Image (spheres, rainbow, N blue to C red):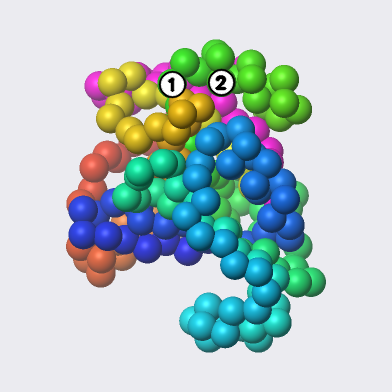
């Protein structure tokens, strides 16, 4: 995953490498209601140069967003002969990208409609509080061994699709040294620390 930032110090885009764009389109466009900003088929010399790849490795791309959202876009790149997914067989505490978060409203209804569409959840919906934040979430494995977290936060101002989803709102990384990682984003990128919480 690659992260880019815009002036408002928010998540601009998350880039995902995948083996096939079809399940991406079915889930993110068909179920979540994201719109296709742009798409491209075939090699991309510019992106290949940026990522240090041969252009022929790139098979296609989709740029998705919650309608009208200026941030949280999802840039999905399909590769020819892709390597195994980074999270293949990963445990929750393994050092790698852990999950992508998608906000929603009316969690029970979203859970039911995704379950009816064949999404398998890891657990029932759980609720928790962090300071003034009251949230409900549930996790599900999706395409390319990605762990999706569906989350609903009370009174959270978020752009939503007509299907009541907002993506991508955040992503979680498991790292060996949280202080060092935090210092990079604060000191190098100038971001502000919003919340520090120990998961028990």
Say few, some or many: other residues with alpha carbon within 10 Å of mark 2 (under 14 / 14 to 19 / 20 or more). Answer: some
Tell me the number on the disc at residue 66.
Answer: none
User: Where on the picture, by quarter, is residue 133?
Assistant: top left
Is 141 covered by the magenta stretch?
yes
Give the left or right position of residue 108, taking residue 4 as reference. right
Which numbered disc flags the more N-terminal residue, 1 or 2?
1
Identify the residue at image location x=51%, y=41%.
34
Q: Is residue 113 above or below residue 28?
A: above
Locate residue 153, reporting x and y percent.
37, 24
Identify the residue at image location x=57%, y=62%.
39
Q: Is residue 12 above or below residue 172?
A: below
Identify the residue at image location x=58%, y=41%.
29
Camera-nearest residue between 63 and 155 = 63
Camera-nearest residue between 180 and 34 = 34
Say few, some or many: other residues with alpha carbon within 10 Å of mark 1 (under 14 / 14 to 19 / 20 or more). Answer: many
Task: Give the main secondary structure of the magenta stretch.
Answer: strand
Tell me the number on the disc at residue 105.
Answer: 1
Q: Is residue 93 visible?
A: yes
Q: Is residue 147 above or below residue 76?
A: above
Give the alpha-carbon distance from disc 1 to disc 2, as whole Å.
Answer: 8 Å
Label 2 near label 1: C-beta < 8 Å?
yes
User: Where on the picture, by quarter, is residue 123?
Assistant: top right
Q: Secondary structure at mark 2?
A: helix
Tell me the number on the disc at residue 110.
Answer: 2
Locate residue 199, reporting x and y percent.
43, 33
Residue at the extreme right of the image, as rendered:
81
Q: Which residues are magenta?
A: 124-145
Give the left or right position of residue 152, taking residue 79 as reference. left
Locate residue 108, reporting x and y percent.
55, 13
């Amino acid at each position: 995953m690659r992260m880019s930032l815009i002036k408002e110090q928010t998540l601009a885009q998350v880039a995902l490498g995948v083996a096939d764009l079809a399940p991406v389109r079915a889930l993110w466009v068909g179920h979540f209601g994201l719109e296709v900003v742009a798409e491209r088929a075939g090699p991309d010399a510019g992106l290949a140069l940026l990522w240090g790849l041969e252009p022929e490795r790139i098979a296609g791309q989709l740029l998705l967003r919650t309608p009208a959202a200026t941030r949280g876009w999802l840039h999905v790149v399909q590769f020819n002969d892709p390597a195994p997914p980074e999270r293949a067989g990963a445990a929750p505490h393994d050092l790698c990208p852990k999950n992508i978060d998608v906000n929603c409203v009316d969690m029970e209804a979203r859970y039911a409609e995704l379950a009816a569409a064949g999404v398998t959840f890891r657990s029932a919906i759980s609720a928790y509080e962090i300071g003034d934040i009251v949230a409900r979430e549930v996790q599900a494995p999706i395409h390319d061994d990605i762990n999706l977290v569906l989350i609903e936060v009370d009174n959270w101002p978020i752009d939503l699709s007509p299907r009541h989803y907002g993506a991508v709102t955040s992503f979680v990384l498991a790292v060996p040294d949280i202080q060092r990682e935090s210092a990079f984003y604060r000191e190098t990128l100038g971001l502000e620390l919003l919340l520090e919480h120990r998961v028990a």
